[in-house]
Image (cartoon, rainbow, N blue to C red):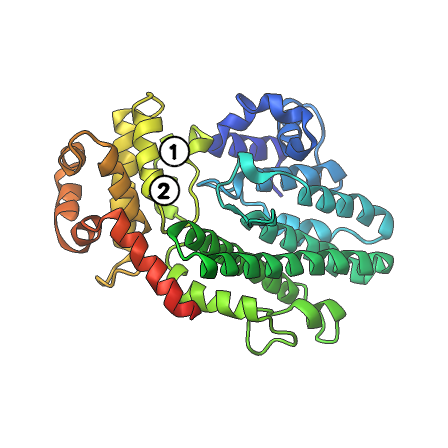
Amino acid sequence: MIDAKTLVDLVRNTAPYLFDEYREKVALPQFRYVEILNQAAIEATTVEWTTEFPEFYQLCLSAHFATVGTFVPTDVDVAIRQKLWKGVHHEKRFVPLWNQVQEFAGWDESLVSKRVVMTPSGKKLSGHQGEWFSIAMGAYGTALKVAPDFIPEIRGQIESVVKNHEAALIELQAAFSASPTIVTARAYFDGVASVAHNLGDLDRMIDAWEIEDTDVLKRRVYRSGHEDAKNPRPAFLKAGEVYQAMLASENHRHFALREPKGLRRSPKFLLNYGPFFDDWGTLIVETGVNTGILSEGDFREVVEALVVGWKKLNPKSIYVSQGYARALCGIMKALPRGREDLENLVPPVIRKELREGGLRTLTGVSRSQFESQWVRKLSQLLA
């Protein structure tokens, strides 16, 4: 297992703002993960942190929660989902970890993620809920072996979140059907992306813990978005169709954007769900370059990463992924001389990519044209 000091250093590398401008947030219970990380930064070299230490699990949860929405997440997901649960052999050890899983559910991801959508009535869908599914399944798989009294409670909480996902999707789809605009379309797309990620995490952990087919929870929630599910849910089935047709190639892990370290300096640069990155590209210029947070060299690295990343995502000239092209459009819009300034910024090999082929075609599409196409296609899929 990773040691506490190294883990804190990894968090600081990808989200340094958690240890400076966010430190005043530690008094708020919904941001307790900030307090845990800052305290660990002080104690990491003086306290003997071991995997037997319950607070170590809480530290790993905090590190994961704080960084999973950043460009370089800390690699403790297997630990919090399975490894650290393997050492739980009795109920006394189980209880503090389950309590921490419940606390995780109440944390607020707004400081560390832009992948959150709210329905008109206030229901929330977020990629962090998939992370909660994963650790809650760790608790469930462990409870089946050592803490049977907790099985109904854990099952009930997981089912409740699944039902909330379904209700939120239904509400977002209804809002789009009533008023098919880019605003309602993006809300529904973001909801679809969240649910696809979250249910995928839930299914994977049910498999990883080898939950029996006769298990009540598995019968009720496993593969809810699939035709072969015991209890298929129409809203999930439709969301799966939309995700595969329109979003699967846009919401990847953004490996290309791990290279420009300047993007890690501010939470303002965190990336929302794709492919609607025009505003993000504009923000890179107006909030990053124009205020001095990003140097010209940082800015060049971001542009190069977008161009190289776009090319890797579209290797056969089949332009299935358009998000990075939209980010470049947003950047050009914010530059005084648009495309000319962008091309002058980068070396010849990158300039050539901007001037030729598919990237030139996609960056020539206006934002209104692009968004209208997506609204129209979504209307057709939902019809």
Q: Position of residue 378 (x, y in %)?
A: 39, 63
Category of crowding for the residue at label 2, using alpha-carbon neighbours closer than 10 angstroms: few (below 14), some (14–19), many (at least 20): many
> Residue shown at 51%/60% (left/top)?
174
Name the one closer to the observer, 67 or 181. 181
Q: Amino acid at mark 2?
A: Leu
Q: Position of residue 10 (x, y in %)?
A: 52, 34
Which tag, 1 or 2, sits closer to the chain's start? Answer: 2
Residue at image mark 2 = 257
Residue at image mark 1 = 263
Category of crowding for the residue at label 1, using alpha-carbon neighbours closer than 10 angstroms: few (below 14), some (14–19), many (at least 20): many
Quadrant for residue 224, please give it.
bottom right
Residue 53 visible? The answer is no
> Residue shown at 54%/45% (left/top)?
75
Q: Are marks 1 and 2 in contact (CB under 8 Å)?
A: yes
- Residue 79's label in the rendered image is none
Residue 138 visible? The answer is yes
> For this view, does 60 lie left or right of residue 15?
right
Q: Position of residue 143 (x, y in %)?
A: 79, 58
Residue extending furthest toward the front = 178
